Amino acid sequence: MKNVRIPFLPRFRLPMLNGIKTCTARPYKMGNRGDFISLFGAIFDIITVEKLTLLDVRDNYWKEEGLSSPREFEEVWNELHPYKGFVPDQEVFVHWFVRIK
């Protein structure tokens, strides 16, 4: 178990603190099950990490990403990854977490 640094946009502070945002897709693995994230004055336990395609995350987990639609997921991804953009079959690591109270 270790404290891992995974950056998040400030807009995700409240969704994370309120348990709305419970996962984050990243191009590479940033933590493992049992690791934790200290952020926004809280601690989040990484409960699992799985490899999925961006298409799968966009279509099935946009709510868990703290977003309002699949389209918003794709827009945020393109904003954060302007060089490569949204590539539907790109494999990403989805880090699932829960806030420790």
Image (cartoon, helix red, strand yellow):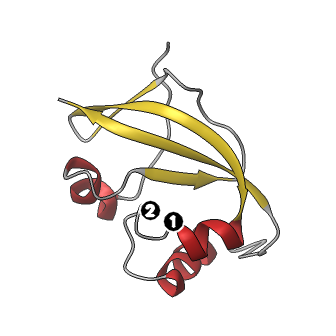
Occupied quadrant, residue 29 = top right
Q: Of the residues shown, which amino acid type is indicated by label 1?
A: Tyr
Report the side of 18 relative to 30 (left or right).
left
Question: Against 59, is 18 above or below?
Answer: above
Query: Do the residues bearing badges 1 and 2 touch, measured as CB atoms within 8 Å?
Result: yes
Res. 54 visible in picture: yes
The residue under label 1 is 61
Q: Quadrant of residue 66?
A: bottom left
Kindly identify the amino acid type of the residue bearing the numbered disc 2. Glu
Q: Is residue 8 above or below residue 81?
A: above
Q: Please name the residue shown 59% across and 79% down the image.
A: 74
Q: Nearer the viewer, residue 20 or 87?
A: 20
Q: The C terminus appears in which quarter of the rendering?
A: top left
* Residue at screen point 45% across, 20% down: 3
Residue 20 percent location from the top left of the image: 28, 58
CA gap, disc 1 and disc 2? 6 Å
Which label was assigned to residue 65?
2
Residue 81 visible to the viewer: no
In the figure, 35 relative to 31: above or below? above
